[in-house]
Image (spheres, rainbow, N blue to C red):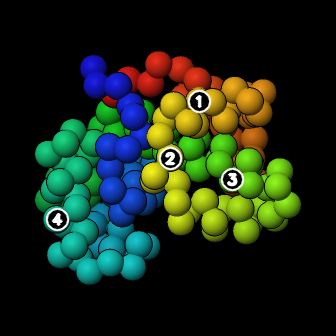
């Protein structure tokens, strides 16, 4: 198993995995394009890249679904977002402001940094953006 560093994917690919995780089911590529406001050809290319890397299964003309590897990584991504959002809200940003701000930089924060922040915050369970699963917070984190 490959260890999660938190820096494996580009910010755009992070958006794809988080969106697929939120949906939790087979998602049509047209829905992905629409939600992420990208051209369908860009969606197809990105999905093919994610599929080659083992994060998603793509059934042409049917849709896209996270693999087990993709599901575990997406869980880390959502937790990273929620932990960073909670941290910013502790420094005076509203939950909505913190969520928006974190979306701008979260892809550049490593798992070791997230583990330190999570530990320092006492392993929180909820942020303004959602629940925090401690299986991804401070754990070994393998794909």
Q: How far, Cα to Cα, is label 4 from label 3?
A: 30 Å
* Earlier residue among tags 3 and 2: 3
Q: Bin the neighbour count of mark 2 within 10 Å (Cα to Cα): few under 14, some 14-19, many 20 and up.
A: some
Instruction: Locate residue 44: give its quadrant.
Output: bottom left
Residue 66 appears in the rendering: no
The kind of secondary structure element at disc 3 is helix
**For mark 3, what is the residue?**
85
The kind of secondary structure element at disc 1 is helix
Q: What percent of the width, then of the height, locates residue 95?
A: 77, 61
Q: What percent of the width, then of the height, locates residue 41?
A: 17, 75
* Earlier residue among tags 4 and 3: 4
Q: How far, Cα to Cα, is label 2 from label 4?
A: 25 Å
**For mark 4, what is the residue?**
45
Q: How far, Cα to Cα, is label 4 from label 1?
A: 32 Å
* Earlier residue among tags 3 and 1: 3
**Residue closer to the observer: 93 or 78:** 93
Look at the image and tell me in which quarter the C terminus lies. Answer: top left
Look at the image and tell me in which quarter the N terminus lies. Answer: top left
Q: What percent of the width, then of the height, locates residue 28?
A: 30, 64
User: Disc 2 vs disc 1: Cβ atoms closer than 8 Å?
Assistant: no
* Earlier residue among tags 2 and 4: 4
Residue 10 lies left or right of residue 119; in this view the side is left
**For mark 2, what is the residue?**
109
Query: What is the count of numbered marks?
Result: 4
Q: Residue at x 65, y 48 (%)?
A: 84
Q: Which mark is residue 90?
A: none
């Amino acid at each position: 198993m490959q260890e999660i560093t938190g820096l494996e994917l580009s910010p755009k690919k992070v958006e794809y995995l988080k969106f697929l995780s939120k949906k939790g089911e087979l998602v049509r590529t047209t829905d992905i394009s629409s939600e992420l406001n990208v051209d369908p050809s860009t969606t197809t290319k990105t999905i093919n890249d994610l599929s080659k890397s083992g994060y998603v299964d793509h059934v042409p003309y049917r849709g896209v679904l996270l693999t087990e590897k993709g599901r575990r990584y997406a869980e880390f991504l959502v937790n990273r977002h929620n932990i960073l959002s909670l941290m910013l809200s502790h420094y005076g940003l509203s939950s909505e402001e913190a969520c928006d701000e974190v979306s701008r930089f979260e892809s550049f924060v490593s798992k070791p940094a997230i583990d330190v922040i999570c530990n320092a915050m006492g392993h929180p369970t909820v942020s303004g953006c959602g629940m925090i699963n401690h299986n991804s917070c401070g754990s070994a984190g393998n794909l």
